């Protein structure tokens, strides 16, 4: 089977993010970037499915030349080929979903796996738009079916199972207060939650092989997609700085303050 | 994107990101614990073996990846920032000094017996040159190996040997002909468990706390003659050949460590306040940091210059010695200044600075002292 996965370039969660004084965005200097962690989980899941069912994993990323770093990372993990949608400048969720739709129509995968959201602006929309516009089934927040206690348990029931006939996919989803299992016909769109799997490291032979794997370049105009954003960010601001705590002399004062000031009891 | 400085290509930087991930997940969180315990788990050797980290420059026939020395250079830089100089030293000794001579001078049989299991991390290796009475003066070692039929009989002592306590084999510098000076030196592989070979003691030390450093004793220790590397008398040249990569590796590790120390110090001075402002607001502090960054950059350029010559196949003995001296001394200066900029916090175990400061001090001593580097450089100048 053919699986399309995404690899968005996002700010490394380890970097310190600062909002520009004028609130138009974040300060880019000195930031490190990496693949969106949810997308890395998508790549991993794609590789596991292909290891089981045969086929190939195609990884796609949208952005300037710098997204090659994330594409090569996915290729080094084991993805077979990459598609680079060369676009710099603003892009909203609908723009992303529109571009991905065209890539899907071109590549004709049996399954698309995306992160449920990207950790930069946490929108959680692209997978849903994409499924809707393709007219495909969707299963969001694919997660683990069983307890996470032991390594053995973790490996027992994969949360994403493709039917023996390659026509359906069964997905365990994380929902409020529990898990829901859904079954979709293929082709389908699945988005990943954090606990779906533990992505592998890129291996050294993988890194060396990734060098010669193809990266196909596409441009929005060539795909016939108008990416003019319908959504604009008007202002960004940092969360208020945390105030210093206070010390209370005894338990009685603590209880009193919890009642009168914090109003939590 | 990480800059490659004209040395590293995209794939080396991809490897760097992978190494960083491994270190962040598997070394860093435990480094303090290992430093306090004075050792790290043996399982790290097999783990590094699995990850292919011990075979980066070795042929596939022995389980290596033949990826090349630049990958190993990346690994060395990143190990410099793994949270423990001792872990970097113990794991580093495996691929920089212990297996190097076997790869360079060993027979196919020796490579299958020692290099291959060391690449897998199943055997731990050590290099034993230094003795209680001879360090800088390598030709002055006194451990002897007298031929007796099919064996060599080894007598003598070695000291300050990294991985010595746990080593499954030691590549040992011996005098096969005590009367012949330099030309009487040879390298002989001695296996753990050979009667007459004992670990006299594990040594306590200032830094590199998590690494095991041992004094080894050889008393009528009978070692099969087939364990000799190359021909008798080639030892001195073999040791010098192997020193090139050892010295570059120490320089590369110093770059990684200094880089980390500089980064943490910049973060620290930006949030630490004194006299109503951040410490970084004092011009003298900003200039100090600018000078530290310049010092690091200069050492980096010289090291990369020597590295380029080395991977290009040149025997760049002067440049390698210069780089070793400059980079390790730079690291001492930077850790010392960083400690100062941290104030009292720099002296405390809660921060990583004091550990870096102790670890860095080994640089200008190990693998040939700065004075010996000067001797080599002077000789290259025709002096
Ligand atoms: C933590 C640690 C790990 C080590 N690991 C290993 C290992 O794995 N294997 C191994 O074989 N060795 C190892 N060593 C030993 C190391 O290589 C030696 O300590 C080093 O080469 C210096 O030798 P020395 O200690 O005998 O000093 P000495 O030779 O006694 O030197 C004392 C002083 O005299 C100076 N000096 C000596 N000769 C000259 C000269 N010609 N001109 C000017 N000054 C001179 C030196 O620079 C130094 O300042 C390790 C050492 C340490 C501390």
Image (spheres, coloured by chain):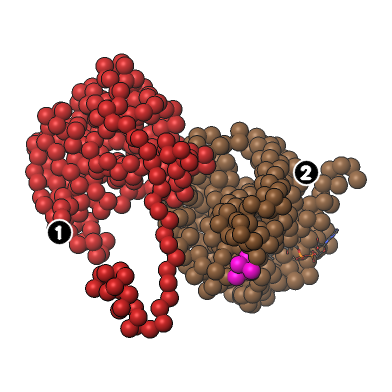
Chain colours: A red, B brown
Q: Residue at x 60, y 70 (%)?
A: B348
Dot 1, how many residues are within 10 Å of its Cα: few (below 14), some (14-19), or many (20+)?
few
Q: How many marks?
A: 2
Q: Residue at x 64, y 75 (%)?
A: B204
Mark yes or no: residue B150 visible: no
Residue A182: % across, % down: 9, 46
Residue positioned most to the front: A260
Residue B99: % across, % down: 58, 54
Side (left or right) of A202 relative to B33: left
From which residue to which does the magenta span run? B344-348
Q: Quadrant of residue B149?
A: bottom right
Q: Which mark is residue B318?
A: 2
Q: Are marks 2 and 1 on the same chain?
A: no
Q: Which mark is residue B141?
A: none
The answer to which of B280 and B30 lies nearer the viewer is: B280
Task: Name the quarter where the C terminus of chain A is drawn.
Answer: bottom left
Compared with A33, B150 (above or below) is below
Q: Chain of mark 1?
A: A
* Mark 2, secondary structure of its residue: helix
Which residue is labeled 1 in the image?
A: A177
Mark yes or no: residue A165 visible: yes
Magenta stretch containing residue B346, yes or no? yes
The answer to which of A261 and B222 lies nearer the viewer is: A261
Residue B306: % across, % down: 70, 41
Compared with B319, B223 (above or below) is below
Q: Residue at x 19, y 62 (%)?
A: A147
């Amino acid at each position: 089977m053919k699986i399309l996965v995404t690899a968005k370039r996002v700010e490394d969660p380890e970097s310190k993010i600062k909002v520009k004084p004028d609130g138009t965005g974040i300060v880019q200097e000195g930031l490190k970037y990496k693949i969106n962690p949810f997308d890395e989980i998508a790549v991993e899941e794609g590789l596991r499915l292909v290891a089981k069912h045969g086929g190939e994993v195609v990884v796609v990323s949208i952005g300037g030349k710098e997204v090659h770093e994330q594409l090569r990372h996915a290729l080094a993990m084991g993805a077979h080929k990459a598609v680079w949608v060369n676009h710099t400048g603003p892009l909203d969720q609908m723009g992303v979903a529109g571009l991905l739709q065209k890539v899907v129509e071109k590549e004709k995968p049996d399954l698309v796996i995306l992160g449920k959201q990207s950790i930069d602006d946490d929108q959680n929309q692209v997978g849903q738009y994409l499924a809707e516009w393709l007219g495909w089934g969707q299963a969001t927040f694919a997660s683990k079916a069983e307890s996470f206690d032991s390594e053995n348990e973790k490996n027992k029931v994969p949360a994403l199972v493709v039917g023996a006939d390659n026509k359906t996919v069964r997905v365990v989803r994380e929902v409020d207060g529990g898990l829901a299992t859904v079954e979709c016909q293929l082709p389908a769109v699945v988005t990943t939650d954090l606990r779906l799997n533990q992505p592998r490291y890129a291996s050294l032979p993988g890194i060396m092989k990734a060098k010669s794997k193809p990266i196909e370049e596409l441009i929005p105009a060539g795909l016939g997609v108008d990416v003019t954003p319908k959504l604009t960010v008007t202002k960004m601001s940092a969360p208020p700085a945390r105030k210093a705590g206070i010390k209370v002399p005894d338990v009685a004062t603590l209880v009193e303050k919890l009642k009168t000031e914090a109003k939590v009891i | 994107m990480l800059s490659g400085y004209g040395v590293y290509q995209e794939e080396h930087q991809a490897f760097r990101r992978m190494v960083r991930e491994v270190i962040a997940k598997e070394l860093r969180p435990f480094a303090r614990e290992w430093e306090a315990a004075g050792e790290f788990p043996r399982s790290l050797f097999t783990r590094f073996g699995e990850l292919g980290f011990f075979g980066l420059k070795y042929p596939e026939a022995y389980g290596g990846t033949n990826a090349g020395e630049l990958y190993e250079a990346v690994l060395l830089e990143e190990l410099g920032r793994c949270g423990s100089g001792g872990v970097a030293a113990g794991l580093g000794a495996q691929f920089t000094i212990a297996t190097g001579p076997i790869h360079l001078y060993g027979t196919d049989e020796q490579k299958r017996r020692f290099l291959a299991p060391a690449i897998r991390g199943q055997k731990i290796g050590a290099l034993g040159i230094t003795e209680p009475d001879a360090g800088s003066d390598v030709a002055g070692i006194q451990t002897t190996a007298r031929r007796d039929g099919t064996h060599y009989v080894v007598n003598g002592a070695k000291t300050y040997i990294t991985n010595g306590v746990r080593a499954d084999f030691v590549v040992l510098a011996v005098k096969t002909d005590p009367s012949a000076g330099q030309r009487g030196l040879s390298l002989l592989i001695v296996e753990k468990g050979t009667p007459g070979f004992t670990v006299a003691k594990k040594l306590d030390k200032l830094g590199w706390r998590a690494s095991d450093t041992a004094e080894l004793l050889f008393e009528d220790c009978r070692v099969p003659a087939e364990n000799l590397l190359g021909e008798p008398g080639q030892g001195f040249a073999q040791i010098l050949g192997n020193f090139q990569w050892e010295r570059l590796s120490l320089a590369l590790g110093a770059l990684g460590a200094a880089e980390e120390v500089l980064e943490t110090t910049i973060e620290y001075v930006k949030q630490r306040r004194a006299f109503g402002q951040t410490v970084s607001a004092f011009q003298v502090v900003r200039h100090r940091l600018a000078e530290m960054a310049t010092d690091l950059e200069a050492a980096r350029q010289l090291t990369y210059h020597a590295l380029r010559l080395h991977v290009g196949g040149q025997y760049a003995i002067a440049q390698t010695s210069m780089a070793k001296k400059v980079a390790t001394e730079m690291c001492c200066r930077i850790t010392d200044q960083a400690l100062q900029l941290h104030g009292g916090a720099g002296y405390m175990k809660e921060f990583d600075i004091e550990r870096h400061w102790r670890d860095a001090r080994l640089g200008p001593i190990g693998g040939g002292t700065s004075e010996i580097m000067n001797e080599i450089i002077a000789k290259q100048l025709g002096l």
